[in-house]
Amino acid sequence: MNQYTIDGQTLTSIELKCLLVSRGVQVDSAVYRRLGREYRLSVNPLTCNCLLLPDGTIVQMTDTRFHLRYLSGILSWENLKLLRYVSELGTPFKIVLQNDKAALFHKHEFVDNVTFPSYTDFFKQHTAAGTPFIGNAVLQGLDWVAFQCLWSCEYAAAGKPCQYCFSGAEFQALAEKGKPQPGALSPEDAAEIAAYAFENTGANSIQITGGSTFSGDAEAEHIRAYLHALQTHIRPERIRELLLYITPPADCARTDEYFALGASRIACSLEVWDPELAKEITPGKIAFTTRARHLEILTRIAEHQGAGKAFSNFIIGLEPFESLAEGARYLAKRGIIPTASVWMPMGRPVRGSMKAPELDYYRRVIDLYAELYVKYNLKPPGQRGLHVCVDRDIWENYCPPADETADHSESDCRETATAFTINT
């Protein structure tokens, strides 16, 4: 894992990733022009660009110029509303073309050269039915094809979207304008897109995510159909991991069926642990699904399928470290993986702010997660990490093999986890 010096502080690659994801970056137009034909690099925010640090760390690359322009268009934000947050949205990071290479700068200081995944025509494709790939799926890093919102969120349409969610804001805006919600992507289209990614981009894993639903039966029909369709297009042994992000069903046994149909792990994500903040930030989940149902399903999966088969995402930066730590410990001791997705403030204020946490917050999170992963031998999903998630990065860089720590006490594990970051 590489180290960098920024503003007089030494950072690891994971810490730099947290800053890049949460602050965004401005990319010089020459980078797109010179490298766009060789690498997976587009001015269209729907392609979900990423960059690769020299040690292989995969980082979401949100070009704030194009991202904010896109969001202001779909959400019809007034200029005055955007201006309220201008002071919080500036990014100190930029990428420029230097000697035909992409060079990352922090303010005026050179950080390192970065690169990007190899070019693919994935986003130019359409399914046999004419459905465009772009806007329906993205490529995450080098391994994943991800369906990030296969059906619309009923909570958002009912006026209770999660505050941080870009898609939820779009569904809410459609509902407020009296316009119909988009239909679910057909299972055949989803399977075609995934198969193309496997054959042509090197993808080996699939992420399936939909909007939250009021009816577990309706969502179960969607999930069954997608899993069956995938089985007809991709041999099961070719799929390294298949992650399901679901609304906790009323019938706990439904998750057994999903595992039988090929799911590797299932997430019922809480996102925020503090109960009062959760009511404000994730109102639909609290009002319609309830925290108790999330925890019931996650616990049942861990008990019936084994430790590490259930996980719950926390969006890092939305709540104080103390409450996040309480939630992560609660889950980990029950065999449920707490995962870590770095909050991307640009575009959607949460609790009236777009200001991301400072570096120390991320360092404390990294130490905490390393401690928990080592202590409970919880291996997060993925191979080299996802664009905005740092849990797998933490595992790969901070957690020694399980057999080296199997007999360690809690204090020993804390020392093991902290030892890797003590000099950062």
Image (cartoon, grey):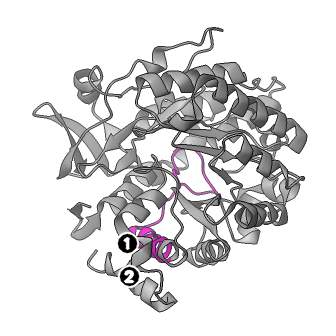
Q: CA distance from mark 1 to mark 2?
A: 9 Å
Marks 1 and 2, the one that precedes in the sequence: 1
Image position of 327 with respect to 259: above or below: below
Q: Position of residue 57 (x, y in %)?
A: 33, 51
Is there a contact, CB below 8 Å, between mark 1 and mark 2? Answer: yes
Q: Is residue 371 left or right of residue 236?
A: left
Q: Residue at x 14, y 30 (%)?
A: 100
Q: Residue at x 82, y 39 (%)?
A: 220
Residue 302: image quadrant is bottom right
Q: Which mark is residue 400?
A: 1
Residue 35: image quadrant is top left
Which range of residues does the magenta coloring cover? 343-371
Q: Is residue 350 magenta?
A: yes
In the image, 274 versus 303, the foreground residue is 303
Q: Is residue 348 magenta?
A: yes
Q: How many marks?
A: 2
- Mark 2 surroundings: few (<14), some (14-19) or many (≥20) residues within 10 A: many
Element on which disc 2 rests: helix
Q: Amino acid at mark 1?
A: Pro
Q: Residue furthest left?
A: 99
In the image, 12 versus 24, the foreground residue is 12
Q: Which mark is residue 416?
A: 2
Q: Amino acid at mark 2?
A: Thr
Residue 170: image quadrant is top right
Quarter of the figure that contains the C terminus: bottom left
Q: Position of residue 148 (x, y in %)?
A: 61, 37
Residue 243 appears anywhere in the view = yes
Residue 318 appears anywhere in the view = no
Image position of 101 with respect to 124: above or below: below
